[in-house]
Image (spheres, helix red, strand yellow):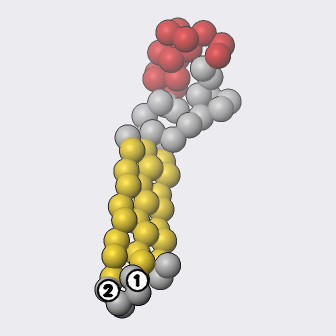
Amino acid sequence: MTAVNGTVANLKWTGPAYADELSGRFGKAVDYRRRPAEDFARAAVTLEDEDGNELMIEATTS
């Protein structure tokens, strides 16, 4: 492996209005004010194969 780059962010659901919406829909089981989860994640991994060729793996979720 030659490089790894990743980003995780809370973009929407930790905002007060959206956290209230989740609480109203799911009750106390979902409280993003106290236990947020990421809304967005991205990762890129750069590798080199046995022949010296650069390979890249990219993954995202939103």
Residue most toward the front?
Answer: 50
Name the residue located 38 percent from the left edge and 40 percent from the top edge.
62
Name the residue located 62 percent from the left edge and 22 percent from the top edge.
31
Name the residue located 37 percent from the left edge and 50 percent from the top edge.
60
Determine whether label 1 and label 2 are within 8 Å by CB: yes
User: Residue 40 lies in what quarter of the image?
Assistant: top left
Which element carries disc 1, helix, strand or loop?
strand
x, y percent for residue 9: 48, 48
Residue most toward the bottom?
Answer: 52
Name the residue located 56 percent from the left edge and 37 percent from the top edge.
37
Report the residue marked by disc 2: 53
On screen, 5 above or below 24? below
On screen, 37 above or below 7? above
Instruction: Decide which of 13, 49 is in the foreground and name it.
Output: 49
- Kind of residue at disc 1: Glu
Instruction: Decide which of 35, 17 is in the foreground and name it.
Output: 35
- Kind of residue at disc 2: Asn
Report the residue marked by disc 1: 48
